[in-house]
Image (spheres, rainbow, N blue to C red):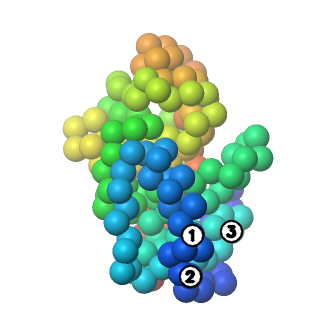
Amino acid sequence: MPRDWQIKKRRPVRRKHIAPLLKDLEFALGIDLAVDGAFLEMANYGPWKMVLVDRIPLAVELMSPDEERVVFLTLRGFLSHPCERRFVEVDHGAIPYLMNGADCMVAGIHNADEAIKEGDLVWVRDQEHKRPLAIGWATKDGTSLIQELKGKGIKNLHWVGDELWEMEL
C-alpha cells in the first residue's frame, strides 16, 4: 500500500452531515464519542475519508474487500476512546513486526473478542498495556484467532509506524 498519501480536501462539516457515520461507529464499538461542540472536519487520505475532531484524526471511512462502507476509529481514536469490542491482543514478540507494518500471525495472538467474524475490521493492542498498535482485516473468526497456532490472523491496514499516527495536524 503506498505511503505517499496526503491529507487533501480538508473541509469543516456540520455534525448533522456526519451523524450517520458517527452513529455507525458508536454502535459497532459500543462507545460514546461525545463530539458535541467539537470542531469537525472531513478530509481525504488516499482512498479513505477521515473524520477529524478538533484537528485530530478520530475516525476513518473505507471500503471493505467486499466493497461495503466501513467506519472505524484510527489509532489515535482508540487512545481517546478505549473499547472492548473487536480487539485482538498480541504478545511482546509480535510488536516489532507490527510496528514495521507486517501482517499479524495467529501465533502471536493471545486474546481476542470472540464476536469477531472473518472479514471484520479489528484493532490490535499489546497484551500488557492495552495500547493500540494496528488496525486490520481479520482473516479468521475470534475463536480461531485465539486457538490456532499457524497462519495469518490479521491483514494489516494501519499501524503505529504509519505516517498518519505520527502526523501533526
Asked if residue 53 lies left or right of residue 43, the reply is left
**Rendered image quadrant of residue 153:** top right
Q: Amino acid at mark 2?
A: Val
Asked if residue 71 lies left or right of residue 67, the reply is left
| Residue receiving disc 1 | 18
Are the residues at dot 2 and dot 3 in contact (C-beta closer than 8 Å)? no
Q: Nearer the viewer, mark 1 or mark 3?
A: 1
Are the residues at dot 1 and dot 3 in contact (C-beta closer than 8 Å)? no
Indicate the position of residue 25 as horizontal and vertical percent values.
50, 53
As drawn, the label of residue 46 is 3
Counting other residues with Cα less than 10 Å from the Cα at mark 1, is it few (<14), some (14-19), or many (20 or more)? some
Indicate the position of residue 155 as horizontal and vertical percent values.
60, 39
Q: Amino acid at mark 1?
A: Ile
**Rendered image quadrant of residue 88:** top left
User: Which residue is at a point 36% across and 51% down the rendered structure image?
Assistant: 31
Q: CA distance from mark 2 to mark 3?
A: 19 Å
N-terminal label among 2 and 3:
2
Count of labels in the image: 3
